[in-house]
Amino acid sequence: MKLLDRLTRWLTEGPFHRWPWLLPAISFAAGWLGFALVQRSEAMARTVATIVLFSWPWLLAVNVLGGWLVRMSGGRLSPKLLDFVTQSLQQEVLFFALPFLVGATQQDAGQMVFTALVASGALISTIDPIYHRHIAAHPGMSVAFHAFCTFVASLVVLPMAAAMPLEDALPIAIATSGVWILLGLPRLLASIRDHRWRALVIPALGVVLVLLWQFRGHIPAAGLSLKNSRITQSLDGLRPGPVVKRIDAASLRANGAIAFVSIHAPIGLSQTVVFEWWHRSERLDQVTADIQGSEFGWRTFTRKRSFPQDPRGRWRVDVLTPQGQLICRLLFLVD
């Protein structure tokens, strides 16, 4: 019990309580450190991610075990203290994940919105008046925010710490968030007095998870880092020729077009990528290729030689994960 008293006193009176900005700053710095280490030292990056992942079980179980911990402590652990620990761990996950999401975000409105949501959630978690008044005090907002943090942890931190293929991260993140919502459901339903609203809760949560899967293409493929990408018409081994933005129709028919990418896949994991060739908003081809993670990245390409009778107009090549998350988008114009 003395150890518990010391821990409680340290949490309530220690440096993180006196300087609430300290933990977010450390977590944000750790995130950038992990992002840099993924590019250079995969073993160290995995170590950093594993340390951050230690907070994950608490994020998953706090609503289930929180009341039990308060009772078992004999009142030494207050609900406010549990909220403080939970808030601190949420800050840790969100700020650590943010650099990886920023690094993977492409010029796609949906991805920009998702990354902005994570950044907003990280910022809100540091502003005590907003967090305690509008999130921690309301079961619905508390469950939703906690599920969001769990989703981000599953999406970004878990694959790095557990050496899990990134293409599995998104389905696992959605499934884990669904499990968390089910764990928090009794608390959420107990806070709703109107039986009609209670009846709508479960269908509404199901709709949210379905929509999350439907719009999965707008979730950044956090962890995959694009080193080089271009449309070109020549290739020497795996060395691409000059970037091509405009191609005349005759040259296109004679030499074709090559979509080249160099992607860094973290911690040595294999990853499948999909090339989709689009012409005037119509998808013409879909080609899969495999990359293998290494500290030097992985280069791959797809070459297109067959074209419509009239190939003029705007062309687009989307490089995607098997789940449809955009890794990069290449554009060129045929005159």
Image (spheres, grey):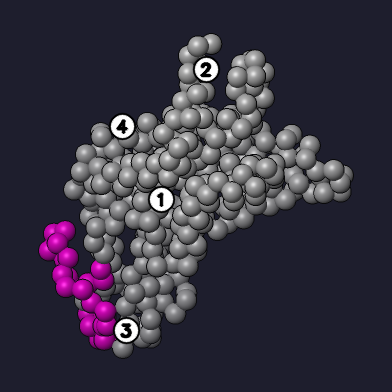
Task: Find disc 2 in the rendering and name its residue.
Answer: 5
Asked if the magenta segment contains residue 241, the reply would be yes
Residue sitting at x 72%, y 35%: 187
* Mark whose residue sits in front, 4 or 2: 2
Three-letter residue code for mark 1: Leu
Ranked by sequence position, the earlier of labels 3 and 4 is 4
Q: CA distance from mark 3 to mark 4?
A: 48 Å
Q: CA distance from mark 4 to mark 2?
A: 30 Å
Residue 47: which disc? 4
Residue sitting at x 31%, y 32%: 47
Ranked by sequence position, the earlier of labels 1 and 2 is 2
Residue 245's place in the image compared with 240, above or below, is below
- Residue at the bottom extreme of this rendering: 335
In front here: 166 or 90?
A: 90
* Mark whose residue sits in front, 3 or 2: 2
In front here: 301 or 199?
A: 199
**Label 2 crowd (10 A; few <14 / some 14-19 / many >=20):** few
